[in-house]
Amino acid sequence: MRQVIIAAGLSLLLLLFLFPLALLGRDPLAGTGEGPEATLPPRPTPAPAAAPAPEGSADEAVSVRVQADGTILELTMKEYLWRVVAAEMPASFETEALKAQAVAARTYTFWKMEHPTANHPDADVCSDINCCKAYITPEAAAANWGTAAAAYAQKIAAAVADTDGLAVLYEGKPIDAVFHSSSAGRTKDAVAVWGGTVPYLVSVDSPEGTEVPNYVTEVSVTPEEFRAAFLGAHPEGDLSGGPESWFGPLSEDGSRRTVGGVVVKNTELRALFGLRSATFTAVASAERILFTVTGYGHGVGMSQYGANALAKQGKSFEEILTWYYTGTTVASFS
């Protein structure tokens, strides 16, 4: 009987030793439908989770307090950046563009930490795009991506992990790494949009174009609608003549124009009439004022579609970032 027990014990030990070896080399995505090249129908996709950060990850060591949906969340930098990149840039974009977005978002977060705001005094950042950056939960992102969720989740996780701890620096400090969707051939100088000179936020060429959805859009308003909105903001304006006489020439830098005898910024007209960008032409007639708008966003800093176009040209994320942020370097920061 003792020999039988010993033999059974040895068999069990052998089985326990050999079973893990049988699994070595197996593709963990095989047959699951979750890999990008899987041929089987995909299973219901679980909420994506960011990949484990590299050993000694700088992003894991940084805590970010986020005000979202009226609550304060404490996330690691890695967790927060996944949510920002997933919300801010299409996951279908080139890998180097996603990396550039991850570094820009990390840099902007460091900058916000050093420049607290009264909008969210108890948090480093918030989920309001008019104050900080867009933000989406993994569950909501998975719902948006459908069957591509697992592949896209991993792609964004890799963009964050592969740029771990990197930031865009000017004179050794994180910059105000603003970005926008698309430009009209060139980005805008910060001074033309916000009135303050920023040495690394100057106008540069940007290669995006007609591949951008709704790259050129039109907004039409009646003369009565225009008069009511404009005089509501500038009661000193003179719109007594025909609409054809209301608009004067653009300023030399293209950021301002004269309307009804008042010099106004294009950014103000953008806000008044819901234009996608401040790069537009305006044609006035007795029937309507037609704005033809190019690009989307404020136009300062990195263009996201421009970054994708540069990535398709073979540019690295470092080259993309230093292209859009003049005089900067990309380096570790903590």
Image (tube, helix red, strand yellow):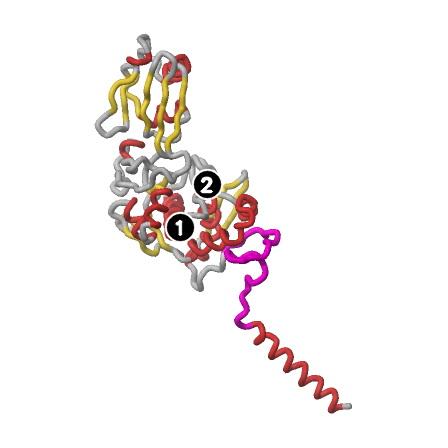
Please say if the residues under marks 1 and 2 sit with CB atoms less than 8 Å apart.
no
Determine the secondary structure under disc 2: loop
Nearest to viewer (mark 1 / mark 2) = 1
Residue situated in front as seen by the camera: 104 or 72: 104
Quarter residue 200 falls in: top left
Q: Position of residue 53 (x, y in %)?
A: 46, 59
Verify whether residue 44 appears in magenta. yes
Verify whether residue 78 appears in magenta. no
Up the image or down, 249 lies above or below 119; here it is above
Question: Residue 301 bears which disc, if any?
Answer: none
Measured in 3D between alpha carbons, the distance from the residue under mark 1 to the one under mark 2, in whole angstroms, is: 20 Å
Mark 1 = which residue?
A: 94
Query: Residue 281: in sight, yes or no?
Result: yes
Q: Position of residue 220 (x, y in %)?
A: 40, 21
Q: The magenta stretch spans which residues? A: 24-50
Categorize mark 2 by other alpha carbons within 10 Å: few (<14), some (14-19), many (20+).
some
In the image, taking residue 22 as reference, residue 311 lies left or right, namely: left
Mark 2 = which residue?
A: 134
Q: Residue at x 34, y 38 (%)?
A: 209
Q: Residue at x 39, y 52 (%)?
A: 99
Up the image or down, 273 lies above or below 109; here it is above
Up the image or down, 115 lies above or below 27; here it is above
Q: Position of residue 175 (x, y in %)?
A: 32, 45
Tag 2: residue type? Answer: Ala
